[in-house]
Image (tube, rainbow, N blue to C red):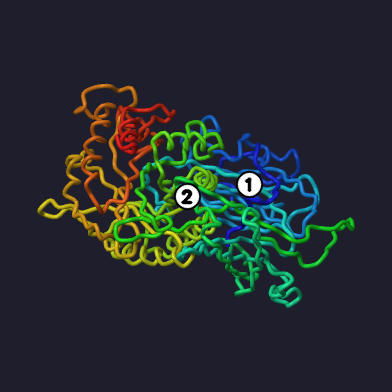
């Protein structure tokens, strides 16, 4: 279960860390912590001729990417040891070490003790460190980061984006009381003149199984408050829960699930819509497990609360329409990677704000966050901006679907992003895959299971995937992927007029207005900004703009199409793209990597404006 931290007071561990590269993987577990060169102090004393000391390496920023931070490591892939010293005053009953994301595999030690490992480069994870932290200023935190590409990983070895290695998102020390709120989930249902809100709360209570606090005592049940609606209600104990927080964890988390529902008159609640994204603060709080004292006799933290900024809305499908609050919405979208020159995958708040400015300039109400979970701040900003989101896991191209470990990690990454973002009103679609082979029988068994897994976690949003289309002998473009039967919205990646055929070819799509909704998730053409020339000459801005004019005209008459998210908002790094116009960048962006517009940007903007 995801550890909610956004509304908590935490101790940030971002800043300058030390980094030691380990390309030959010579510092294994014993080497790292047996005093043979990397762990402090080295064997034999200060004069022993060691090759590396873990907290005296290269200075590196966290969050950050070593490919951008360290000169000479621009193309480095492999292992890197990170370290920093951590202060701890012992002023809470329990403490967790929480990572926003580490690409790709992380192994974590605290004061020489292995806390565990995590695999997956874009989702958060946490370790309890209550009994591992000492009350001192120099607790040694060590993280071995490995961004090696392999087919047995998710994504697999071959992708169309750059692998940025590092601790790419924030690291926090999270103090909590003995009995605390692990996570909450808020759901909305609309029926007639009623707006029904259901809240679930996962309370981690180590005493519940022993009956000391029970977890079911009405006096200790969570209370929900929405101040702007002047309304509160108590939750009831619904079930016990126990889970492993992530693959590689050496412990479980357990407690009680509480649940409760309340109903508002529709006239008293402003629903969230892309045109009017109304948000409310919703607080869940619990009493503690009784007064406790720290070693100095002072009261320790007692009780706990979480606050979420939520919007009340529903997302559904009817025929070939996507509905928000029961009303059809056309998805005017764009796709984007999480990347910035000089920052890699570790964007700042100002970088995210700039992307939303570009999205607004296009007139979009929808964005596809490709091809992996982006920073959770993207969804929170989208909540405020009224931008619907497609959130994706990196099941990309050649996934080893027949490997049980890959399938387990697949489910883990899905669970981690769903539980992180399931309260975001902007998140409308969970995408489970991109461009996987629909003739692979194992894939056709696994992906429906993943779709069912997503719905078991959250059935209030739409399940989708970006797929290919097929062409019949007669030239008709059809949906032949058997996964279509398991999706709410069918995403199509098509590059007619760029990789094959003509932009107008999509007029031959087998249109079925009764559904399912078809979302054109990728369509586009490449151009190098500033390369002016004839509209029939590839890589010119004029050819890209003309491609958009013809392709948009072809899509405009397809009733089954509920919207599109062309590829892509801005140019991004891709080592496989090496012709003279690209040189390590995918140039299908409507802006270049520095944010400068190409001519096609205005074409799409005018289309979305109805011009």
Helix, strand or loop at mark 1: strand
Question: Furthest residue to the right?
Answer: 297
CB within 8 Å, label 1 to label 2 = no
Give whichever of 339, 87 is nearer the camera: 339
Residue labelled with disc 1: 171
Is residue 408 visible in the rendered image? The answer is no
- The picture places residue 6, in percent across and down from the top left corner, at 62, 50
Above or below residue 450? Residue 175 is: above
Look at 85% across and 61% down and name the residue there: 293
Is residue 325 visible in the rendered image? The answer is yes
Residue labelled with disc 2: 373
Q: Quadrant of the C terminus?
A: top left
Look at 61% across and 57% down and name the residue there: 3
Horizontal side of residue 438 vs 236, given as left or right: left
Above or below residue 368? Residue 511 is: below
Above or below residue 29? Residue 584 is: above
């Amino acid at each position: 279960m995801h550890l909610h931290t956004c509304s908590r007071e935490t101790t940030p561990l971002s800043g300058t860390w030390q980094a030691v590269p380990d390309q030959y993987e010579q510092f294994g577990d014993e080497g790292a912590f047996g005093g043979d060169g990397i762990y402090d102090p080295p064997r034999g004393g200060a004069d022993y001729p060691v090759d590396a000391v873990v907290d005296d390496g290269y200075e590196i920023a966290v969050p950050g990417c070593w490919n951008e931070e360290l000169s000479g490591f621009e193309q480095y892939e492999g292992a890197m040891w990170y370290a920093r010293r951590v202060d701890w005053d012992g002023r809470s009953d329990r403490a967790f070490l929480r990572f926003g994301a580490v690409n790709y595999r992380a192994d974590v030690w605290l004061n020489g003790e292995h806390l565990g490992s995590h695999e997956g480069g874009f989702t958060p994870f946490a370790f309890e460190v209550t009994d591992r932290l000492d009350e001192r200023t120099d607790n040694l935190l060590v993280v071995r980061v490995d961004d090696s590409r392999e087919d047995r990983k998710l994504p697999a070895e071959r992708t169309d984006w750059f692998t940025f290695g590092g601790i790419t998102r924030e690291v926090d020390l999270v103090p909590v009381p003995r009995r605390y709120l692990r996570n909450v989930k808020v759901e909305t249902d609309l029926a007639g003149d009623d707006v029904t809100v259901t809240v679930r709360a996962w309370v981690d209570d180590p005493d519940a199984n022993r009956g000391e606090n029970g977890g079911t005592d009405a006096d200790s049940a969570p209370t929900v408050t929405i101040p702007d609606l002047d309304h509160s209600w108590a939750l009831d104990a619904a079930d016990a829960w126990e889970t492993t927080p992530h693959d590689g964890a050496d412990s479980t988390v357990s407690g009680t699930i509480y649940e409760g529902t309340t109903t508002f008159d529709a006239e008293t609640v402003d629903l969230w819509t892309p045109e009017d994204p109304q948000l409310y603060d919703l607080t869940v709080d619990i009493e503690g497990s009784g007064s406790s004292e720290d070693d100095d006799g002072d009261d320790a933290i007692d009780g706990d609360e979480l606050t979420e900024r939520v919007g009340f809305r529903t997302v559904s499908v009817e025929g070939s329409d996507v509905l928000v609050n029961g009303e059809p919405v056309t998805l005017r979208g764009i796709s984007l990677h999480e990347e910035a020159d000089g920052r890699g995958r570790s964007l700042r708040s100002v970088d995210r704000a700039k992307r939303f400015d570009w999205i607004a300039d296009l007139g979009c109400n929808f964005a596809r966050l490709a091809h992996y979970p982006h920073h959770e701040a993207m969804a929170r900003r989208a909540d405020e901006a009224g931008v619907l989101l497609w959130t994706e896991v990196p099941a990309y191209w050649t996934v080893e679907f027949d490997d049980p470990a890959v399938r387990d990690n697949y489910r883990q990454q899905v669970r981690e992003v769903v539980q992180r973002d399931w309260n975001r009103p902007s998140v409308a679609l969970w995408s489970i895959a991109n461009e996987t082979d629909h003739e692979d029988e194992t894939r056709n068994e696994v992906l429906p299971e993943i779709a069912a897994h997503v719905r078991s976690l959250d059935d209030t949003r739409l399940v989708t995937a970006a797929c290919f289309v097929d062409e019949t002998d007669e030239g008709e473009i059809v949906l032949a992927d058997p996964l279509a039967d398991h999706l709410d919205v069918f995403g199509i990646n098509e590059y007619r007029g760029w990789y094959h055929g003509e932009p107008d070819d999509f007029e031959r799509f087998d249109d079925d207005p009764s559904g399912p909704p078809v979302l054109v998730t990728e369509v586009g053409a490449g151009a190098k900004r500033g390369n002016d020339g004839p509209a029939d000459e590839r890589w010119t801005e004029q050819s890209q703009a003309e491609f958009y004019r013809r392709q948009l005209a072809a899509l405009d008459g397809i009733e089954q199409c509920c919207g599109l998210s062309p590829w892509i908002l801005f140019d991004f790094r891709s080592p496989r793209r090496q012709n003279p116009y690209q040189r390590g960048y995918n140039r299908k962006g409507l802006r270049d990597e520095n944010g400068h517009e190409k001519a096609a940007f205005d074409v799409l903007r005018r289309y979305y404006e109805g011009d």
